[in-house]
Amino acid sequence: MTAGQSLADGAAGIALLHLETGNRPAAYEALRHATAGGVSIAEGASLFYGAPALAFVLATTDHPGLAQARAATTDGTAIVTRRQLDAAHRRIDRHQQPHYAEYDLIRGLTGLGVVLRRLGNHDLLRQVLDYLVRLTEPQGELPGWWCWNGPERRQPPPVGGHANFGIAHGITGPLALLALSHRDGITVAGHTTAINRISRWLDTWQQHSRGTIWWPQTITLTDLHRGTPTQQTPLRPSWCYGTPGIARAQQLAAHALRYATRQHVAETALISCLTDPEQIRRLTDRGLCHGTAGLMATARRVASDALTPIPLAAAEDVHRQATPAADEPEGLLDGKAGADLVTAAATAWDACLLLS
């Protein structure tokens, strides 16, 4: 893979920062670097890599010198999406369980749906939504998104697979896209049913401890049969796997369907996270994915739609007080670009995190 094409940690993410903050010369230089070796539509192309990643970034600029790149990456995104949709439907037809990379935000069809929404390709977006509806259909005792693989790449999967709750790799990513599309007026048959299926699953696995509301990062078949997660307390309050991202997805779903009670619970969960020193101490970097920037970006979007006052200053203070590591990378998801972008721009760049 060519690192420049990565939205997560390459030049594509750097270009997004510069475009959003108005530094056009630096943005165009980063884009030239990102596209110098061509743009990938091979396996692995996704919201965070290759043609779709560059399409997401280029959608923010009308620079005439980038018109050809915009057209190429737009076409490439459509090719990648159709290929992945075909594979996903074949997998479902065979009654097999998915790998979360089939549907997740980072590598899968939810992420491609984010790009299509940004590009305004509503016809192909509706095909992605049709797939997500189908993904939520139960398979026996298991939800359709139950994965055969495990959450850790370097470890063998748990017996019977797992269900993932995080917005980056789990079912709250599809929930957020379904909710945002519904809010946009872009709907498909079974759309509301799919949102409700996921929301009821999250209701079932909602946890309470020390005055906080939270959800497990993952559950196994053993957890499912026992009716309680192995995880006993909330872990790191990160965007990717923690309460903030999960709460935002549920807030969006509740807002879309005008379900005030569920929206209040989601917002209360975020507040309990922001005001719990034990959780906040678990954040050890400034990044969007795992760190204080992700918490701030998520809290800001929750506050913008909230029925309940959100202590946004708490998240801003946590990020402002975070010290950059000596080896802090330059990239968007885990590095300086994301940490800077969250304080510099209040635009729709955070659609790549499914926050808007």
Image (tube, rainbow, N blue to C red):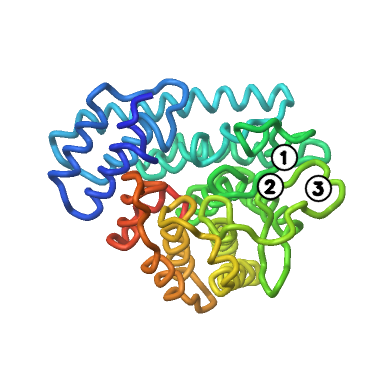
Q: Is residue 14 above or below residue 97?
A: below
Quarter of the figure with the C terminus: bottom left
Query: Under tag 3, what secondary structure?
Result: helix
Label 2 sits on residue: 218
Q: Are marks 3 and 1 in contact (CB under 8 Å)?
A: no
Question: Local crowd at mark 2 within 10 Å, few (<14), some, or many (≥20)?
Answer: some
Q: Are marks 3 and 2 in contact (CB under 8 Å)?
A: no
Please name whichever residue, 250 or 126, is drawn nearer the observer in this view of the structure: 250
Crowd band around label 3 with a 10 angstrom C-alpha radius: few (<14), some (14–19), many (20+): some
**Could you tell me how far apart the alpha carbons at marks 3 and 2 are, in whole angstroms?**
9 Å
Among the two numbered marks 3 and 2 on one chain, the one whose residue lies closer to the N terminus: 2
Disc 2 from disc 1: Cα separation? 7 Å
Going by the numbered disc 3, the residue's amino acid type is Asp
Would residue 148 be found to the left or right of residue 132 on screen? right
Q: Residue at x 68, y 47 (%)?
A: 218
Looking at the image, is 328 positioned above or below residue 141?
below
Q: Secondary structure at mark 2?
A: strand
Q: Is residue 286 visible?
A: yes
Please tell me which residue is depicted at 21% across the width and 38% down the height of the picture.
30
Within 10 Å of disc 1 (Cα), the crowding (few <14, some 14-19, many 20+) is many
Q: Between 283 and 272, which is closer to the camera in this rendering?
A: 283
Numbered circle sitting on residue 162: 1
**Residue hosting label 3:** 223
Q: Is residue 229 left or right of residue 68?
A: right
The residue at 57%/36% (across/down) is 103
Q: Are marks 2 and 1 in contact (CB under 8 Å)?
A: yes
